[in-house]
Image (cartoon, grey):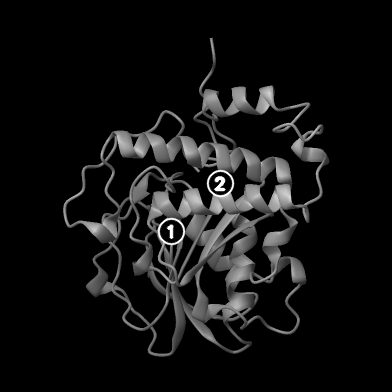
Amino acid sequence: MRVFNFSAGPAVLPEPVLKQAAEEMLDWRGHGMNVMEMSHRSKEFIDIAAEAEADLRELMDIPLNYRVLFLQGGATGQFAAIPMNITKPGDKADYAITGNWSKKATQEAKKYLEVNVAVKTDAHTHIPKFEDWEFSKDAKYVHITPNETIHGVAYNQYPNTGDVPLIGDVSSMILSQPIDVSKFAVLYAGAQKNIGPAGITVVIIREDLLGQAREDTPIERTVSTGGSRLTVWSILLASCACRLLAFAAKSVAWVPTSRAHALTRPRMSPYTSSR
């Protein structure tokens, strides 16, 4: 009997994905080698990456003016990458502290820019009304964590930040429910919950925010170039999982948020866990 891991860290992967990976372990699609042995510059890898991106775009109805990146380092790595890539020293950003993960994101961001805590909860049992948040007039972005798994707090709606980019850490909820990507400038997530093995980070970023990295940003943390360093094995599993989820979503009439006012939401996948 298979065990479903709903604990912190890596979660269970769909059995069909694992079986397909096992069948192709020694010979991936007749190429005479395993995907872990392939060059990340090869046509085979490029095809795998393109397939994974296409499936994720379809699942999340990602607009064409957004880039999809598969990176390394986990979502925690984006706590620093976000301010390094879209702000300059001395800039300010607004952060909402509603649980453990948003608190960690705030602490890391303070190393790179001025942080205004727009809202902070002490017991982390609710999301305060948006009209009570104290936004900065000169914030370069607003950061939220829509699902705080440690404290069990989730947003039912998102703040309207106007022209100020809204950024969301959706690690624990990505592909478990519809997300209107167009409401955000950046979404990022550790993919080990619903997409693939631990080690993959998905970053969905609006194209107008690319090319603004600070000069001292490490190349590994530069979002416009970081996607080329993901292992072939990880992205293959992500591609397989996305393809399976795309099929499942269609079977339960999952309508992307930007295409309908009323959603027929699929039941929670058994492959979903906490962050």
Residue 264 is situated, as x and y percent measured from the top left of the image, at 21, 43
Q: Nearer the viewer, residue 271 or 255?
A: 255
Seen in the image, is 35 located left or right of residue 256?
right
- Look at 52% across and 37% down and name the residue there: 241
* Residue 189 locus on image (x, y percent): 53, 54
- Which residue appears farthest toward the left when viewing the image? 262
Determine which quarter of the picture holds residue 19. top right
Q: Amino acid at mark 2?
A: Ala
Cα separation, mark 2 vs mark 1, equals 15 Å
Which amino acid, mark 1?
A: Thr
Which label sits in the foreground, 2 or 1? 2
Residue under the image location 51 percent in, 76 percent down = 207
> Does 158 appear above or below 19?
below
The first of marks 2 and 1 along the sequence is 1
Q: Is residue 37 above or below residue 14?
A: below
Where does residue 13 sit, x and y in percent of width and height? 55, 30
The residue where tag 1 is placed is 145
Q: Is residue 68 above or below residue 44?
A: below
Q: On residue 191, which mark appears?
A: 2
